[in-house]
Image (tube, helix red, strand yellow):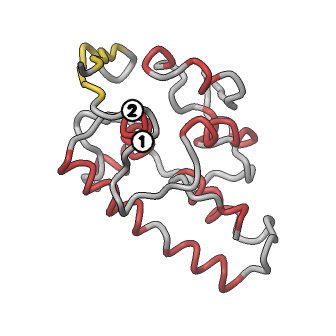
Amino acid sequence: MLKKIIVNDNMQSDYTYFLQEEIGQNFHVDFKPDLTPKKMLELGIFGGKYLTDCKNEFPPDWFINAKLSPNYKNIDINYFKVDASLPLSHWFNKGWIYEYDPRGWFQWYCRYYMGRRIEIEDLRQIKRWKAIRRHIGAIKKNCKPGDLDCRRKQRQALLHWAYDSRLI
């Protein structure tokens, strides 16, 4: 039987979805993120402002060591201590936001990781995720291996997309 999730937070009311896969299992063959949502939250992403009002939707252990800032975006929480985000309004204007994931790619990834599947949207988001890889090439070209101070903004952006740029 499919598990039903009902979302009520600051950006969605009575949104319902079903988990079709086991948590962290059966990803699309082309989707191989380096980091889980839990690990991303622990490392520090989006100035700690992401998911602060929707903890009930996800496993409690995701938030035990998460670096969060419920009242404001705090860049010092980010792993690389830089702002690598554009405002959500920019993402809306570009048409990159899926109506049922109003917070963007990371919200999609959290729900996908949990087991939600929406074939057309999943393929679109995986395509976007793959396109971000271009930043890995720039880091490899311009930075010495392991130099985490080199291209910190690109490294933080990669972290926002579940790529572990600490390994580059």
Spatial distance from mark 1 to mark 2, Cα to Cα?
Answer: 5 Å
Left or right, 10 with respect to 69, comes to left
Q: Quadrant of the C terminus?
A: bottom right
Question: Who is closer to the viewer here, 88 or 43?
Answer: 43
Residue depicted at x 64% and y 58%: 164
Horizontal and vertical percent for residue 129? 41, 60
Residue shown at 33%/54% (left/top)?
28
Q: Position of residue 94 (x, y in %)?
A: 29, 56
Q: Quadrant of residue 18?
A: top left
Left or right of residue 67: residue 128: left
Q: Residue at x 73, y 48 (%)?
A: 79
Give the class, few, some or many, for how many residues have Cα within 10 Å of label 1's Cα (few <14, many ≥20).
few
Which label was assigned to residue 137?
A: none
Q: Nearer the viewer, residue 83 or 1?
A: 1
Image coordinates for residue 161, horizontal then vertical, percent? 51, 54
| Quadrant assignment, res 152 | bottom right
Give whichever of 69, 101 is nearer the camera. 101
Horizontal arrangement in the rendering, residue 79 relative to residue 98 (left or right)? right
Residue at 74% x, 49% y is: 81
Task: Give, as a three-letter code, the residue at label 2.
Answer: Glu
Residue located beneath label 2 in the image? 22
Q: Secondary structure at mark 2?
A: loop
Q: Are marks 1 and 2 in contact (CB under 8 Å)?
A: yes
21 shown above or below 140: above
The residue wearing badge 1 is: 25
> Which quadrant of the rendered structure holds the N terminus?
top left
